[in-house]
Amino acid sequence: MREAGMNVWVLTGDKQETAISIAYAAQLITRREKLIVLNASTEH
């Protein structure tokens, strides 16, 4: 995907650290890439 110039978005209900670890393990991202982390909370 990177070679095609595609952006990768990871959306999850997991903890932020878990999502990042899984993205590295699945080779969706590499240590050389810049991560932009968005956090949000919703009041019910």
Image: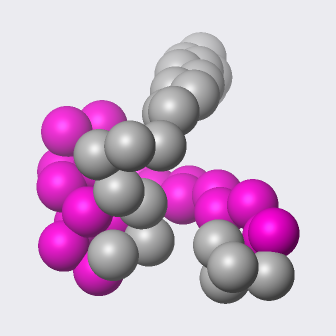
Q: Residue at x 81, y 69 (%)?
A: 5
The image quadrant where one finds the N terminus is bottom right
In the image, is residue 6 above or below residue 20?
below
> Which of these two is toward me, 9 or 40?
9
In the image, 42: left or right of 17? right
Residue furthest right as drawn: 5
Q: How many marks?
A: 0
What is the quadrant of residue 36 in the picture?
top right
Tell me, yes or no, if residue 34 can be seen here.
Answer: yes
Colouring scheme applied when the structure was drawn: secondary structure
In the image, 37: left or right of 17? right
Residue 14 place in picture, x, y as percent? 29, 52
Residue 28 place in picture, x, y as percent? 44, 71
Residue 39 place in picture, x, y as percent? 53, 22
Q: Residue at x 64, y 58 (%)?
A: 9
In the image, 16: left or right of 42? left
The image quadrant where one finds the C terminus is top right
Q: Is residue 39 magenta?
A: no
What is the quadrant of residue 10 in the picture?
bottom right
Residue 17 place in picture, x, y as percent? 19, 39
Magenta span covers which residues? 5-26
Q: Is residue 21 magenta?
A: yes
> Which of these two is toward me, 13 or 7?
7
Tell me, yes or no, if residue 14 can be seen here.
Answer: no
